[in-house]
Image: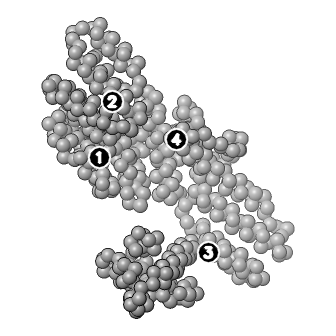
Amino acid sequence: MEKSKLAQLLLGFSKEELRELGKFSATPFFNPRPEAAALLRVLSKTLLAGKPLPSKEQLFRQIFDKDTFDDHRVRMAMAALLQTTEKYLAVQDFLQDKPAYHLRLSKILQTRNLPAQAKTAWQEGYTALEQRTLRNATYHYDFYRFEEERYRVALDTTEAAQANLQALSDQLDTAVLSRKLWQGCFLLAHQARYNAVCDFGFLNQVLPFAEKYLDLPAISIYYHCYLALTKPSESTHFQAFKNDLLHHDALFPPDELRDLYILAINFCTRRYNEGDLSFLRDQLDLYKIGFDKNYFRSDGVLSRFTYLNAATIGLVAREFDWVENLIKTQRQYLEPAYQESLYSFNLARLEYQKGNFGQALQLLQLAEYKETMLALAAKTIQLKIYYESDEYDLLESHLQAIAAFIRRKKVMGYHRENYLNLVYFVRKLLEMNPLDKKAKLSFRETVEQTKPLAEKEWLLGQVL
């Protein structure tokens, strides 16, 4: 029972939703199967009491009050309740969307030849739409749909000659441009992440036309984002994108803001990785603002990658107080499986950067690192501490352990060579005479030319 679609759906319901669903399922119009309502009463009582869901046999006895079990009848009741529950969710969501509800009602009343009532419904929906603070691409499309309905109604009246068809055409341009630019930015992100080949359709042809609409944040923010991603050397586009993002955040919903901030941060990351350090401060600013305004959480959960990457940028910028606050305050929003390991790892990195090697080593030993890459990152911190503390015996044993760990892992991609190269060059450091300038120069040249190589900057810093 607990693995069924019905159980998975109901387990996510709140007490209030279960009560509302009970009322909904008791209405024959939505639920013509009485056994489905009876099944819900049993399941709701169990869920509200916090008890495990009953088996099909137990459900059968409570619903049908018979001893001879019939699996088919239970499955039919479950299917009916699942269908009713899905109807409830759809109807509830639709009724909460006042603009969509009134627009649909206006169309229905118009088909029933009730133009006055249709106009009233349209006006109520239009007012509800305008009262919303959001002005993203979805708003512009919804606005177009209302204007289109106004035009269609006017065609059947004496107002047809006054219908503003040009305004309707302009609004369609706005709706299409805002949505197309939105789609283009995320196609670029997808293309970069998965090395995919994407067709952007007519987007590049309409970019000059979009310049006429840059007074609309839903267009300007994605216009500058798209150009920043396609022309990274022209920094004015990124700065315009960032400026729009900071000044028009009230016009976009939280999930869209999270995506926009990630787009901006990823742009900065790529520029930093290409050697352009000028975007480091921009990246840190975006992280600071994003965390202050809670933009990075999705359904209350913070991505472990955002947690790690934000701490990394803060450490590079040596903003230790901010990093410590981030590590401690955001820990609770991570998935439970990652909370302990990522918290200890980030704190260890912080203590290492502050020169507190003993505390860093203790923190690294507090958690078990189940993910290969996180385990390697933790081992790398230990490696650096042993080297910088002149603990060469410990370092040699640790290098052997890292090499053995890497060889045990069958699937690591280029990271396998990345970290084996690190082990190789640390051994070269141990063998090198620190007074031999020629050897140091040769070491630097070889490190700079080696790819892939983890901790390249750190290695170069050891032979200054």
Q: Given the image, on which type of amino acid does mark 2 rest? A: Tyr
Image quarter (top left, top right, bottom left or bottom right) of the N terminus: bottom left
Q: Nearer the viewer, mark 3 or mark 1?
A: 1
Regarding mark 2 in the picture, which secondary structure is present there? Answer: helix
Marks 2 and 1, the one that precedes in the sequence = 1
Q: Marks 2 and 4, how far apart in space? A: 23 Å
Marks 3 and 4, the one that precedes in the sequence = 3
- Residue at figure coordinates x 60%, y 49% from the top left: 183
Extreme residue toward the bottom, this view: 65
Task: Establish if 181 lies above or below 254.
Answer: above
Q: Given the image, on which type of amino acid does mark 3 rest? A: Tyr
Q: Marks 2 and 3, how far apart in space? A: 58 Å
Residue at mark 2: 419
Residue at mark 1: 370
Regarding mark 1 in the picture, which secondary structure is present there? Answer: loop
Residue at mark 4: 194
Q: Marks 4 and 1, how far apart in space? A: 25 Å
Residue at mark 3: 101
Marks 3 and 1, the one that precedes in the sequence = 3
Regarding mark 3 in the picture, which secondary structure is present there? Answer: helix
- Residue at figure coordinates x 32%, y 41% from the top left: 372
Marks 2 and 3, the one that precedes in the sequence = 3
* Residue 122 in the figure: left or right of residue 29: right
Q: Nearer the viewer, residue 146 or 433?
A: 433
Marks 4 and 1, the one that precedes in the sequence = 4
Query: Residue 148, which numbered label?
Result: none
Q: Marks 2 and 1, how far apart in space? A: 18 Å
